Amino acid sequence: MNTHLIGTDVNRIDGPAKVSGAAKYAAEFFAPEMLYAVVVSGTIAHGEISSMDTKKAMEVAGAVEVFTHKNRPHMAWRDKSYLDEDAPTDGKPLRPLYDEKILYSGQPIALCVAETFEAARAMSRLIEVSYKSLTHQTDLAIAVQEAKKIEGTNRTGIEPPPKPRGNSARRLQTPRSSWPRSTTRLPRSTTRWSCSQPP
Amino acid sequence: MNNFEYVHADGLESAATFMAGHAEAKFIGGGTNLVDLMKYNVEKPTALVDLNRLSLREVEEMPDGGVRIGALVTNSDVAYHSLISARYPLLSRAILAGASAQLRNKATTGGNLLQRTRCVYFYDTAVPCNKREPGTGCPAKEGVNRSLAILGTSVACIATHPSDMCVALAALGATVQVTGSKGDRSIPFAEFHRLPGDQPEIDTTLQHGEVVTSVDLPAIGFAGHSAYVKVRDRQSYAFALISVAAGLELTDGLITQAGVALGGVAHKPWRNAQLEQELLIGKPANRDTWHIFQQALLAGAHGFGENDFKLKLAPVTVVRALEQAAHEGAQA
Ligand SMILES: Cc1cc2nc3c(=O)[nH]c(=O)nc-3n(C[C@H](O)[C@H](O)[C@H](O)COP(=O)(O)OP(=O)(O)OC[C@H]3O[C@@H](n4cnc5c(N)ncnc54)[C@H](O)[C@@H]3O)c2cc1C
Ligand code: SF4
């Protein structure tokens, strides 16, 4: 094996291009008739959009369209349709511009599309939004108290989680020394990845 | 960012004339602060007047023994200029403690003076801010205020001026030369920036259309005894939580001249020349002197929650800077 590279300083092939600004980023490759989009984010943490006026944005020279929850293209409604090899099997997929509900601060609420990036950005500043704000909770410990159990957990096409077993609350009240030791030992090479190992 | 007109000033007079006819126009120097703020939609000038073709790029000695720094001299060129590093090392150190090499290469002397606060609410157009939109309120007082002021605050605003360079210029007692349609003015550094009061939207006493032409340094540069101590979250590329510029002249262990200014504590570099006269001049250069001075200088400071730590950090930083300044000469 040729190991002359180990311990030697080697210049990056694209180093000069990067420091001089000549290197191209993905966003700097242009295709003919390409359009540009800028996302508008919501400014409240919880509530709903009561109205949205996109008229002024559409008056910007080069404006093509403003997408909102009112005019977005059709979106699959079953969670399963969003599954791919990477998606977690639990939880909900992100459905941008799905409806008027605001679930978190900075949620995308509109997409401004234009012939130039500058026009799209100018449009994004001209969208007028009014909200119906609800109170938000950012303290996880308090939010857990208010958590509700969702009934009917059998969501279409997705395996339900296994039934709970044991009683962790009661177990935690007993001294640690009386806990049963795990009988299955993880293979040595994988132990450092495991979070379930007793500390 | 919105569309705007872009013109080059080819003379100070034509720049003033253009400005007189454009109430929403702004000058641009290096653009390192203004362009950022335009991208954030905080600054919305209808026109930019580029000053870079004006011949304000000299650092020159003055007949009175002082040094004049042209408004377009970059922060790097000031910091590394032989006159400055030899005679005003405090200024070099303060500049080099700020931003990054790339930014300092671009940033100008005039622009550094007029850079705006880094208060996070000022930058976020989705929230109220009296400085950005007068009358809307100041969420920083009960919110994120770790980097904000403990002195000279008002009900309307508790922002800090973020510059390092200006803290040194305050300690040195510089003079800002400006020109506009109403003629030339010399503004003592202490009067250039203002406290927020009930008009936090106004940072300085510069009038619309007035150009900063130079910053003049006095003959005394504290070359023998000076220190710039900047306390920040990271050792590089971070704004000051507290900074102190201290310059001393000593004769036989007694203080004959002094200039001490703080950054990160107020809407302007914080200096009190009268207290320096009373509590430093003629006194021995030792810790007891620094303590008495520090207590008087920081009297009345109060925190807003997240920034309460500055009440403890400011006094020790003043003492450390003065101690360092006094000892520096002994070693040199
Ligand atoms: C990432 C980052 C980190 C930074 N860190 C630090 C730091 O640690 N410490 C620090 O001190 N600074 C720091 N800075 C701020 C930097 O010092 C300023 O942005 C710079 O000094 C501004 O100079 P400029 O010439 O680019 O000003 P510009 O952006 O061109 O202008 C700023 C303002 O000054 C006005 N102006 C410019 N020149 C004149 C003139 N001659 N007459 C009248 N008005 C004029 C403009 O109209 C504008 O309002 C940082 C900046 C960035 C972006
Ligand atoms: S401190 Fe000043 S800049 Fe910050 S939110 Fe309050 S008014 Fe705005």
Image (tube, coloured by chain):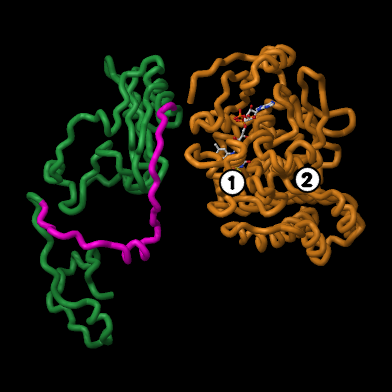
Q: Amino acid at mark 2?
A: Ala
Question: Which chain is in green here?
Answer: A
Q: Which mark is residue B138?
A: 1
Q: Amino acid at mark 1?
A: Cys
Q: Determine whether label 1 and label 2 are within 8 Å by CB.
A: no
Quarter of image, ligand 1: top right
Secondary structure beneath dot 2 equals: helix
State whether the magenta stretch is mostly helix, strand or loop.
loop
Q: Position of residue A139 (x, y in %)?
A: 39, 60
Q: B7 or B89, which is in the foreground? A: B7
Q: Taking B230 as reference, is B40 above or below it? A: above
Cβ of mark 2 under 8 A from ligand 1: no
Left or right relative to B192: residue A4: left
Q: Earlier in the sequence, mark 1 or mark 2?
A: 1
The residue under the point 62% across, 21% down is B25
Q: Taking A177 as reference, is A128 above or below it? A: above
Q: Which residues are magenta?
A: A126-155
Q: Position of residue B257 (x, y in %)?
A: 87, 50
Q: Position of residue B303 (x, y in %)?
A: 64, 58
Residue position marked by numbered label 2 in the rendering: B171
Cβ of mark 1 under 8 A from ligand 2: yes
Residue A84 seen: no
Q: Give chain B's shade.
A: orange
Q: Based on the picture, tell me whether residue A6 belongs to the magenta stretch.
A: no
The part of the image, by quadrant, that contains residue A65 is top left
